[in-house]
Image (tube, rainbow, N blue to C red):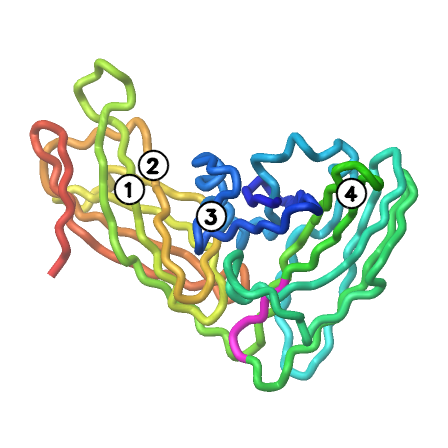
């Protein structure tokens, strides 16, 4: 069986040969019925666009021998800008940091639909060699070549997997898959756009027993209206009735969004003391920098802080 969860920039797939089970976020399936595994899988679905790699196996990680972690691959994420009909060549660097030889199979899978999409063959990318043997402490390079079809617009996406098998006859065999994502944006066809789809605010005290609120948590929905992936980041500025800055809350670069995807991002600020009254909330979202097309979008709301410390948001006519 296999399971998926996010762990930085790495993906590991543990597959038991006797069970062919796959978890996808779209179906919300769990072979072992563990809610924590399901939660981690949902996180992975959001984050893989930013990190490029996922840890597959999550809740059964303890079954994997330590030798699986000996394979490293770099880069962990590739973003390319190419013209249709043109060829781009690059390399992955592999290293065996373990004490046993590794037999590695290299294969690419279509990743246009993200973690829950189809896994069709990738016609526009080739990798060579497709099999590598690494002695302990040794490294190798795998060449990849991209050639975007002439009719392509927006973006192509694939995940290249490096698979190893361990175990012998009569024992439980495991399969480890270390993968890296490749984004290929087509020069001249990128359309960058996004929308702040919803905003909510919670203003509370960060320390139990303290009556005055000082922690502002803003949940900001971002809808990707681009034809390529985006990785949003931004800030929120609250201005008082005189136009002065009362508070600034930032949210760092988060997970990515594929075209037409939407998700919530949190901008959280501590040590924020807002007097009762009416404020103007200016939200600025930056996106597109990952594909060299930086774009900013803005949304303005009114925020009303009550004498008790509550906060309500109002749309601006």
The correct choice, above or below, for 300 with respect to 215 in the image is below
Position of residue 144 in the picture relative to residue 280 (left or right):
right
Total marks in image: 4
The residues bearing labels 2 and 1 have C-alpha atoms spaced at a distance of 6 Å
Q: Quadrant of the C terminus?
A: bottom left
| Label 1 Cα crowd, 10 Å radius (few <14 / some 14-19 / many 20+) | many
Question: Which mark is in front, 2 or 4?
Answer: 4
Q: Position of residue 127 (x, y in %)?
A: 78, 66
Q: Does dot 3 land on a helix, a strand or a loop? A: loop
Residue 117 highlighted magenta (yes or no): no
Q: Residue at x 26, y 16 (%)?
A: 208
Kindly give the residue lying farthest to the front in the view shown: 170
Tag 1 residue: 218
The residues bearing labels 3 and 4 have C-alpha atoms spaced at a distance of 29 Å
Q: Are marks 2 and 1 in contact (CB under 8 Å)?
A: yes
The correct choice, above or below, for 119 with respect to 56 in the image is below
The residues bearing labels 2 and 3 have C-alpha atoms spaced at a distance of 32 Å
Mark 2 or 4, nearer chain start: 4
Tag 2 residue: 268
| Label 3 Cα crowd, 10 Å radius (few <14 / some 14-19 / many 20+) | some
Mark 2 or 3, nearer chain start: 3
Q: Position of residue 22 (x, y in %)?
A: 57, 51
Residue stretch in magenta: 153-158
């Amino acid at each position: 069986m296999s399971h998926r969860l996010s762990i930085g920039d790495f993906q590991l797939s543990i597959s038991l040969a006797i069970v062919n089970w796959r978890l996808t976020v779209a179906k919300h399936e769990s072979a072992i019925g563990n809610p924590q595994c399901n939660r981690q899988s949902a996180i992975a679905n959001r984050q893989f666009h930013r990190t490029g790699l996922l840890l597959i196996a999550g809740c059964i990680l303890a079954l994997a021998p330590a030798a699986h972690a000996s394979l490293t691959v770099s880069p962990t994420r590739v973003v390319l800008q190419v013209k249709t009909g043109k060829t781009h060549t690059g390399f992955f660097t592999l290293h065996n940091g373990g004490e046993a030889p590794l037999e590695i199979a290299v294969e690419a899978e279509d990743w246009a639909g993200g973690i829950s999409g189809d896994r069709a063959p990738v016609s526009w990318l080739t990798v060579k060699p497709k099999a590598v043997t690494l002695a302990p402490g040794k490294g190798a390079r795998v060449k990849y070549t991209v050639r975007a079809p002439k009719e392509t617009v927006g973006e192509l996406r694939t995940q290249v997997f490096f698979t190893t098998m361990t175990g012998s006859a009569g024992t439980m065999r495991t399969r480890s898959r270390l993968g890296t994502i490749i984004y290929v944006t087509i020069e001249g066809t990128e359309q960058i756009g996004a929308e702040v789809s919803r905003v909510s605010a919670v203003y509370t005290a960060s320390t139990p027993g303290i009556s005055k609120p000082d922690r502002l948590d803003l949940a900001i929905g971002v809808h990707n209206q681009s034809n390529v992936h985006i990785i949003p980041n931004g800030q929120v500025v609250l201005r008082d009735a005189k136009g002065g800055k009362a508070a600034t809350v930032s949210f760092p670069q988060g997970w990515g969004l594929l075209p037409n995807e939407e998700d919530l991002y949190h901008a959280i600020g501590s040590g924020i003391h807002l007097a009762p009254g009416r404020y103007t909330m200016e939200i600025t979202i930056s996106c597109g920098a990952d594909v060299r097309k930086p774009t900013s979008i803005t949304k303005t709301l009114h925020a009303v802080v009550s004498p008790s410390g509550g906060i309500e948001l109002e749309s601006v006519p």
